[in-house]
Image: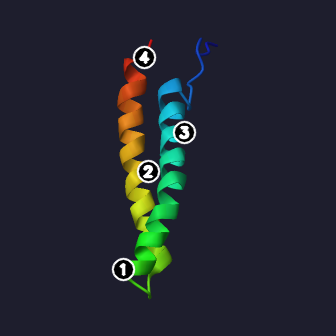
Amino acid sequence: MTSESAPKARWTKDRAGAALAATTGYFFALGPAIETAKRLTRDYTYEAAFLAGLAVAVLAYWIGLRLMKKLP
């Protein structure tokens, strides 16, 4: 009977750092996105702000993942 010597890690430092960057980007972008969406549209304010925050979070995750892979 053999077992794997190293367990498979689900969260690496790269993914954890990128997730932190995405979460931070979302919460920093949500406030200005809500204010901008209130001025531009009245019916779908929070939906538009969510989509804008989500776009920032995806971009921050991608950039964070690239930067974290360069670190030792």
**Mark 4 crowdedness (10 Å alpha carbons): few <14, some 14-19, many ≥20:** few
Residue at the extreme bottom of the image, as rendered: 43
Q: Earlier in the sequence, mark 3 or mark 4?
A: 3
Q: Which mark is residue 40?
A: 1
Q: Which mark is residue 71?
A: 4
Q: Earlier in the sequence, mark 2 or mark 4?
A: 2
Q: Earlier in the sequence, mark 4 or mark 1?
A: 1
Q: Which residue type does callout 1 highlight?
A: Leu
Residue at horizontal 54 percent and vertical 54 percent from the top: 27
Q: Which residue type does callout 2 highlight?
A: Ala
Calculate the distance from the C-alpha at mark 3 to the C-alpha at mark 4: 16 Å
**Total number of numbered labels?**
4
Q: Which residue is mark 2?
A: 57
**Coordinates of residue 4 in the picture (x, y in percent):** 58, 16
**Mark 1 crowdedness (10 Å alpha carbons): few <14, some 14-19, many ≥20:** few
**Coordinates of residue 67 in the picture (x, y in percent):** 38, 27
Residue at horizontal 36 percent and vertical 40 percent from the top: 62
Calculate the distance from the C-alpha at mark 4 to the C-alpha at mark 1: 41 Å
**Coordinates of residue 68 in the picture (x, y in percent):** 43, 25
Q: Which mark is residue 17?
A: none
Residue 15 or residue 36, whichever sits in front: 36
Say which of marks 4 and 1 sits in front.
Answer: 1
**Coordinates of residue 9 in the picture (x, y in percent):** 57, 26
Q: Earlier in the sequence, mark 2 or mark 3?
A: 3
